[in-house]
Amino acid sequence: MVKALTYEIERQDQILTGGGEVQQETVGWDEARNVTVSQRGKEEAHDYRYFPEPDLPPLQIEPTWVDQLRIELPELPGEKQARFVSEYHLTPYASGLLVEEHPVADYFESAVAHDPGISPTKIANWLTGEYFSLLNLAGIEIQKSKVSHQDFAELVAMVERGDINATIGKEVLEEIFETGGSPVDIVDARGLAQLNDPQAISELVNQVLAENPQQVEQYLGGKTTLSQWLFGQVMRATGGRANPALVRTHLDQALKNLEESCRSEE
């Protein structure tokens, strides 16, 4: 095929350059000689005796009907993606993921409309991240999920308000996905509300430091990576419910106080 096309390009170029006219014909490829050979001439349309079909009258389409159909057309994926970027300030990548399937795009917009106070970006991140992962693992489409758009929006709102942290949010989403139900009811029933009491968190930090003197000593000796281990111990003591930012603040301050105390003793 490549040889035949290359040969024809050169042959027809030479004909046209020389002022000739390329004939309308069917050619074949002679493999032995590496040339094309004429097989038969191609007739013009009138030679085929074309004529109108008497049982099919001309189709007259009214422009007003075409305009009405255009109005009734659904929003195409490309247009929807562009709108998601401009209206909801999503990235082109996130918007592209959401508009790949019409039910997913509808679910996203329904969740955003349910609580306008939630950032559409946060809803999109949870949807294309944790939620997509659950859907893929289960092998189901979003319209068959037990997680309603209302409950999904409420879950994201609870995380954003600080009622629960992101880790607990993922855990609650998994439970809703498996059994259905309200995120508020699940959090209340299981006592998963985020611990935001600075005094309680400070006491837990001091308790963890007191219970792990060896690790504290190693930290003060220069092994600063143990700070993350101690952070994990505080979070574990609260069942993951503590506000991570508050834990980090109080832990850093407690360790700083210990460092200053050691320097003063020296």
Image (tube, helix red, strand yellow):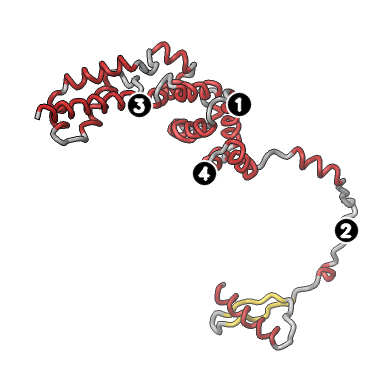
N-terminal label among 3 and 4:
4
Question: Dividing the image into 4 quarters, which one contains the C terminus?
Answer: top left
Look at discs 2 and 3 and give the one toward the viewer.
Answer: 3
N-terminal label among 1 and 3:
1
Which residue, as the protein is rendered here, is positioned at the far front?
Answer: 264
Q: Which mark is residue 216?
A: none
> What residue do we see at 32% from left, 22% from top?
240
Type of residue at label 2? Pro
For mark 2, what is the residue?
52
Look at discs 3 and 4 and give the one toward the viewer.
Answer: 3
Corner quadrant of residue 230: top left
Q: Nearer the viewer, residue 263 or 169?
A: 263
From mark 1 to mark 2, how far is it between C-alphas? 55 Å
For mark 4, what is the residue?
93
Residue 178 in view:
no
Q: Nearer the viewer, residue 183 or 256?
A: 256
Q: Secondary structure at mark 3?
A: helix
For mark 3, what is the residue?
245
Crowd band around label 3 with a 10 angstrom C-alpha radius: few (<14), some (14–19), many (20+): few
Q: Are marks 3 and 4 in contact (CB under 8 Å)?
A: no
From mark 3 to mark 4, how far is it between C-alphas? 29 Å
Type of residue at label 1? Ala
Q: Secondary structure at mark 2?
A: loop
Which residue, as the protein is rendered here, is positioned at the far top?
Answer: 189
User: Residue 223, how many percent across, how many down?
Assistant: 17, 35
Which residue, as the protein is rendered here, is positioned at the far left?
Answer: 266
User: Residue 116, how many percent across, how many down?
Assistant: 58, 25
From mark 4 to mark 1, how far is it between C-alphas? 21 Å
Q: Are marks 4 and 1 in contact (CB under 8 Å)?
A: no
